Each structure stands twice: as C-alpha cells, then as structure tokens.
Amino acid sequence: MKNKTPQTPKKRSKVTKRPAKAHVKEKPVILITNDDGITAPGIRNLVEAVRDIGKIVVVAPDKPQSGMGHAITIGQPLRLHKAQVFDGVESWACTGTPVDCVKLAVDKVLHRKPDLCLSGINHGANHSINVIYSGTMSAAVEAAIESIPSAGFSLLDYSIEADFTGAKKYARIIVEKMLSGKLDKHTVLNVNVPLAQADLLKGIRICRQAYAKYEEDFIERNDPHGRHYYWLTGEFVNFDKGKDTDVWALANNYVSVVPVQFDLTNYALKEKLKPWEK
C-alpha cells in the first residue's frame, strides 16, 4: 500500500476589500401648498425658506381659496396644470381647494406620501377660531389625516407687499426642528407670526388656542338692479385672558405654535355622558 503524501492546506487567495460605499442620506420630500394661490408671495417665501432642506414639490390652488376650510371638490372635475412659478422646483396648479391639492399631490403627483407637508405662508392670521375656517390649516390637517406630519404658517399681515423676513426665518427653524426628531405621523402645527420687524420677534411660544371669535355683522346693500345683498364684516374679540394662548403670544411679539388635531372628541364630556348608556 502506497503511502499517501499528506496534502498541505491550500493558501487562501487574498481578498481585496472594496471600500465601503458612503451612505448618502436622501433629502426628505416636502410638499408645499397654500390657500392664497400658487402665485401668492407667501408661498414663494415659504419655498425659498426651505428649498435647500429637501426635495420640494408644490401643488397649490390656481386661484385664492381663503376661508374654504376643509372643503373638497365632488361635483365637478379637478384639473392639474404644470406651473413654472419657482425656479428649479416642480410645481403644479390645481383647480380645486387646498385639501384637494394635498389629496392629488399624494395620489397623482408624488405617488407616495411626502415626509412633510407645509402650508402657507398665509397672508393674514390663522390664530384662535380662525383655524376652523382656514384653508391653509385644513390643508395641513388633511396631510396629518393621511399620516404626514405637517405645519401651517401664517403672517398677521394681509398686504400683498407684506415683509416675510421674520416668517421665513421661523418657518425654517420650525421645519428643521420637525425633521430633526421622530414626530408622530399625525402631528400638525398651527404657526402664526406677529406683524413685527424680524429683529423685534422674541422667539417661539408653544401655546394653546385662545377662546376668541369674530363678532360678526352683515352689511345690507343694494346692487345696481335694486336687489339686496349682504357683505360680511366683523371685529375680532378675545375672551381669553390667559398668557399661554396664541393670541397673547402674538400680541407680545412671539411666534405662536399650537399643536392641533383632527380628533374632535370631547373626552371629558364623553365620560360625563357614560350614564346615558344605562
């Protein structure tokens, strides 16, 4: 029997390690909308404030939609038109309401949920009871319903020539804070900026919604044909003297941030009404 020559282990060939690929973090997708229309100065300033933070896509009404609240279009067709409004930013003009814009953006433009939805910057206040009527805030609330963290921004200046310097500064600060942490997917913030020079703004206050409302009046007039018509007017009255409200913060040159929600359940009253079940 022949002796077997012992085999020596084969030398392992040297494996050249490939350099690890650098992990490039993708920028967040940010949807921007408003209720003043796609050509309003406010939305242009909001785009400018955050355009380098993420991939910005704008879907906004083709005309002013203030006071539309959470209205949606159900009796007529909706149309989307590519708009060349913001240099280097994909933008679409929609014939519908602010809420329509959010719905269409998710389903037909982005084909996904954005990481954040921003609405505004609105020309005029959306503090206190205004949040109920606001198209700006309804767009943000709709995003939150769709599990997209959102914020609505408003400046207490109705002028088309309003100075958005302070609003842009604080919009960017708040968006950076929203993106830096893990937010609940239903987060929605109502942000209002006082009518004051940027250097006079004192900072941010986290507030509750003040109990305030408009004492309304309808002025009755006649048109050239002698037919009656009514013009809604009113005076904003604050019934809330608390120093933790959005109205107080704005009156004292703070940017107010009110976390709001679409769950309108009155939980305290719900418990009180439990005996009705018996």
Image: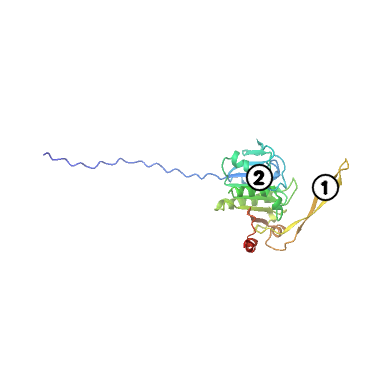
Q: Mark 2 points at which residue?
A: 99
Considering depth in this image, is 109 or 75 the residue closer to the camera?
75
What residue is shown at x 64% (from left), y 39% (from top)? 91
Image quadrant where residue 40 sits: top right
The reply to whether residue 154 is visible in this rendering is yes
Q: Distance between the residues labelled 1 and 2?
A: 28 Å
Q: Is residue 13 above or below residue 233?
A: above
Q: Is residue 244 above or below residue 14?
A: below
Q: Which colour scheme is used?
A: rainbow
Considering depth in this image, is 13 or 218 the residue closer to the camera?
218
Considering depth in this image, is 158 or 78 the residue closer to the camera?
78
Q: Is residue 21 above or below residue 256?
A: above
Question: Would residue 232 be found to the left or right of residue 92 on screen?
Answer: right
Q: Quadrant of the N terminus?
A: top left
Name the residue at the front extreme: 278
Considering depth in this image, is 71 or 16 the residue closer to the camera?
71
Question: Would residue 158 be found to the left or right of residue 108 on screen?
Answer: right
Q: In this view, does 83 lie above or below 222?
A: above
Q: Residues within 10 Å of mark 2 (few under 14, many from 20)?
A: many
Q: Position of residue 190 (x, y in %)?
A: 66, 53
Tag 1: amino acid: Tyr
Q: Do the residues labelled 1 and 2 touch (CB within 8 Å)?
A: no
Tag 2: amino acid: Val
Q: Position of residue 235 (x, y in %)?
A: 79, 55
Instruction: Please tell me whether mark 2 sits on a helix, a strand or a loop.
Output: helix
Q: How crowded is mark 1: few (under 14 residues within 10 Å), some or many (20 or more)?
A: few
Q: Where is residue 262 in the image (x, y as percent from the top left)?
A: 63, 53
The reply to whether residue 82 is visible in this rendering is no
Q: In which quarter of the image is the C terminus?
A: bottom right
Instruction: Please tell me whether mark 1 sits on a helix, a strand or a loop.
Output: strand
Q: Name the residue under label 1.
A: 230
Q: Point out the tag, 1 or 2, that comes first from the N-terminus.
A: 2
